[in-house]
Amino acid sequence: MNIKKNIPNILTLANLFCGLMIIVYAAQLQFNDILYWAIAALLFDFLDGTAARILNVSSEIGKELDSLADVVSFGVAPTIVLFYYWQSVFTGGIAFCAPFAIALFAAFRLAKFNSTEQNNDYFRGLPTPALAFGCFILPQVESSLLWANSTINNIYFVMVFSLLGGFMLVSNFKFFSLKLGSKNKKLNVIRTTYLTTCVLLIVWLHFFGAFLCLLAYIGFSLSFQNRIN
């Protein structure tokens, strides 16, 4: 086996492993531990593509494997986290199905991603890791802000967050990538402003600020559609 050629694939499998661990800890209601695995999954997701470019070993197998891993780590895993986190909210009916929309839309979004030509400056539809991070951070928001408990655990919030989040995944809106150094100077300004905003939000509001970073990303992207080309 060519080790160099498979380094990106090994990193992708590490991302997949983290996603599986998130599911295990979610079933045990250990939401604090989930965050560590979520950060690791995001890191491996970034590193596999970076390694493929640096080593110049991109392949169709790697591309497909990456999407399969992302379906688990950023589609199924956040769905399971929300399902167990919100299980006390589901008092009957089919409301318990709402979080599963995220996994379904994530799978469709990743298939769509693989079948279309991509632009280095933006994504069509909300990237799955962005929404997944928002899902993973939600249980921490409640523990850090007691007043948020009634809002986050409201059945209407559950429905809106799950369905609207799923819709954003498969929408045709442009969401800028966070890769600095683009030739698009206006886009670089937007990225820098957004990242600075995120740092301030996290320092000021901690976990709630981290969750607001997702909303800020959506807001920044929707506000500057004409500049994301």
Image: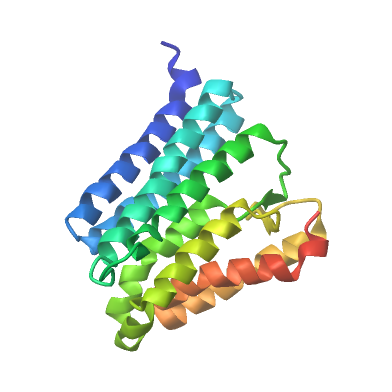
> Residue 173 at what x, y percent from top left?
70, 58
The one of 102 and 12 positioned closer to us in this rendering: 102
Left or right side of 169 for 229 = right
Tell me the residue at 81%/55% (across/down).
184
Left or right side of 164 for 37 = left
> Residue 17 at what x, y percent from top left?
31, 38
> Residue 111 at what x, y percent from top left?
57, 37
Left or right side of 192 for 12 = left
Q: Would you say residue 229 is visible in this rendering?
A: yes
Q: Is residue 166 positioned above or below 151 on the image?
A: above
Say which quadrant the N terminus sits in. Answer: top left
The colouring scheme, among rainbow, by chain, secondary structure or one colour, is: rainbow
Hey, which residue is sitting farthest bottom in the picture?
147
Left or right side of 78 for 113 = right
Hey, which residue is sitting farthest top in the picture?
1
Q: Is residue 209 positioned above or below 46 on the image?
A: below
Q: Would you say residue 186 is visible in this rendering?
A: no
Say which quadrant the C terminus sits in. Answer: bottom right
**Rendering quarter of residue 60:** top right
Tell me the residue at 71%/44% (across/down).
120
Q: How many marks?
A: 0
Tell me the residue at 45%/41% (across/down).
71
> Residue 140 at what x, y percent from top left?
32, 71
Tell me the residue at 33%/61% (across/down).
96
Q: Is residue 62 positioned above or below 210 on the image?
A: above
**Rendering quarter of residue 32:** bottom left
Hey, which residue is sitting farthest left in the picture?
28
